[in-house]
Amino acid sequence: MEQPEKNIIDHLSVFIHRKWLFIAPLVLGAAAGLVVSFELPEKYRSSTLIVVEEQQIPEEYVTPTDRTPFSQRLNLISQQILSRTRLDQIIREFRLYEDHKPSVFSRAAAFITGEDIEDRTPDDIINRMREDIEFAVIGEVNTKKPQTGGNAFSITYIGTDPQTTMQVTNTLASLFIEENLKVREQYAEGTTEFISSELEKSQEELAKTEQKIKDFKQAHMGTLPEQLEANLRTLDRLQLDLQNVTVNLKHNEDRRQVLEDQLRFTPVPNAVSPAVRSTLEVELENARAELSMLLSVFKETYPDVLILKRRIQELETRLAAQPEPQPEQAEKKARPSEVMNPVYGELMAIKSQISTLRQRESELRASIDEYQGRIELTPQVEQQQTDLVRDYQISLQNYQGLLEKKMNASLAENLEKRQKGARFRIVDTANLPDTPDYPNKPLVAAIGLLVGGAFGTGMVFLFEFINPAFRKPEDFEGIIDSPVLSSIPLFPANDGGQGQKFRVIKGRKKSA
């Protein structure tokens, strides 16, 4: 036979019968919750809000050198603020964690683990402060480290004293602002220094390239590409001059041949006039006549004119250097046997002109060969010069680009030093907490009450399971086979305090 199911009244009767097993843990749990809530140290929370202001001067005028994303910059600065040196300085300044006494539960846990909580190292205190500092980007869940996104963030510090907590929070915010300005300024200075060093190298390279081009032009003067047009014009002029000299030379050669033939068949005169001139005088007169003819056609800077002028000066110098003839010499010259034939003087002048023209022809041919060589070398020189000019243009463009970047970096550096760039600004200063954020005493007491009640309920059901009791006739069903004939109500015992005795009386079930 199965035992009948128990209803809520039956369960409540179990609690009533074993009420002390439930009430005692319930009271102890509530008392423990109250003790714990008052034993735990009070902690206050203070927060401040910081926003990132954009650059005050448009980027079209000054391009910033620091384009680090907000999240990356915030992570970098937070790592510097949470460094051992900075936190140790704050701890010493505000005398943090000096009056903190470990709780009873901390002492108990330390006793079990064998840890000496009285002997904490500076690293433990710094790690404790790191745990009490929280960063949160606006719009994201609070966390110990700043996350990505947003242009504002909050700094929260948890401490045991409200005033100190607020001061520490303001100090952390100030450190963030100062460190941001310092980092951006150092970044701008580093950028300017780097570009300046690269600019000096580029300037040196540019100067070396310019010197190479200068040396190259000096070494190849006359064969440079920009001189090709002048060389061609000079070559044409030299060829024209050579043609004129060749024509004149041929004419003088023919005239010389005629004079030689005439001199060979012309008899010597019996007498000579006193006005007979010497060979130098005849040659000088012919040279002057030829100079007059050339000046009527060419300018005074014409090469043939210059050569003829030098020839005239030379003849005049030689003629002036001869001594004046003595009477005896003049008389001797007047002798018919030694008087010079006029044809002979003209012949000597023609020969002098032929010699000058041949010298000029030789000079012109040499000059033509020289300019032809220059023209032939010009393509090769042009290729070499093109390579040098290309290197120079690259160096010049690099130098100009670095110069422009240096000017922009200098402007950006001045922008950061004057605090006109992107910066952190405190929107909400740290608040002075009125009530402790931790612990929540009513919540802790309620938790203790719930734990005690759960423990008491467990004890009631445990004892009921270990030592069940029969409280009404229906409880016997399913336990014994015989039916219950009668039930005896409770009555005081007269056995000297030994308690009540109950006996089960067997009966038989009547057959139908």
Image (spheres, grey):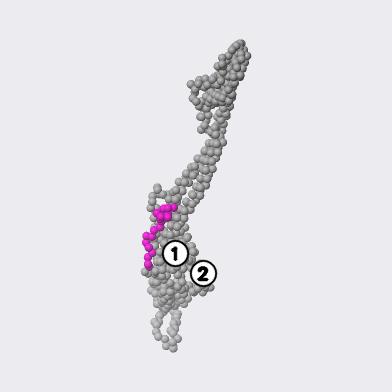
Q: Position of residue 382 (x, y in %)?
A: 54, 34
Q: Position of residue 17 (x, y in %)?
A: 41, 78
Q: Nearer the viewer, residue 403 or 110?
A: 403
Residue 253 falls in image quadrant: top right
Residue 153 falls in image quadrant: bottom left
Q: Residue at x 38, y 51 (%)?
A: 57
Separation of marks 1 and 2 at Cα, in angstroms: 19 Å
Give the foreground label among 1 and 2: 2
Q: Nearer the viewer, residue 318 or 218?
A: 318
Kind of residue at disc 2: Thr
Residue 272 is inside the magenta segment: no
Query: Mark 2 — residue?
Result: 121
Which region is colored magenta?
413-433
Q: Nearer the viewer, residue 278 or 432?
A: 278
Q: Residue at x 54, y 19 (%)?
A: 286
- Judge the density around disc 1: few (<14), some (14-19), many (≥20) Cα neighbours within 10 Å: many
Q: Earlier in the sequence, mark 1 or mark 2?
A: 2
Kind of residue at disc 1: Ile
Q: Are the residues at dot 1 and dot 2 in contact (C-beta closer than 8 Å)?
A: no
Residue 427 is inside the magenta segment: yes
- Judge the density around disc 2: few (<14), some (14-19), many (≥20) Cα neighbours within 10 Å: few
Q: Is residue 506 above or below residue 239?
A: below
The circle on residue 133 is 1
Q: Residue furthest right?
A: 337
Q: Decide if residue 164 is on the left or right side of residue 332.
A: left
Label 1, secondary structure: give it.
strand
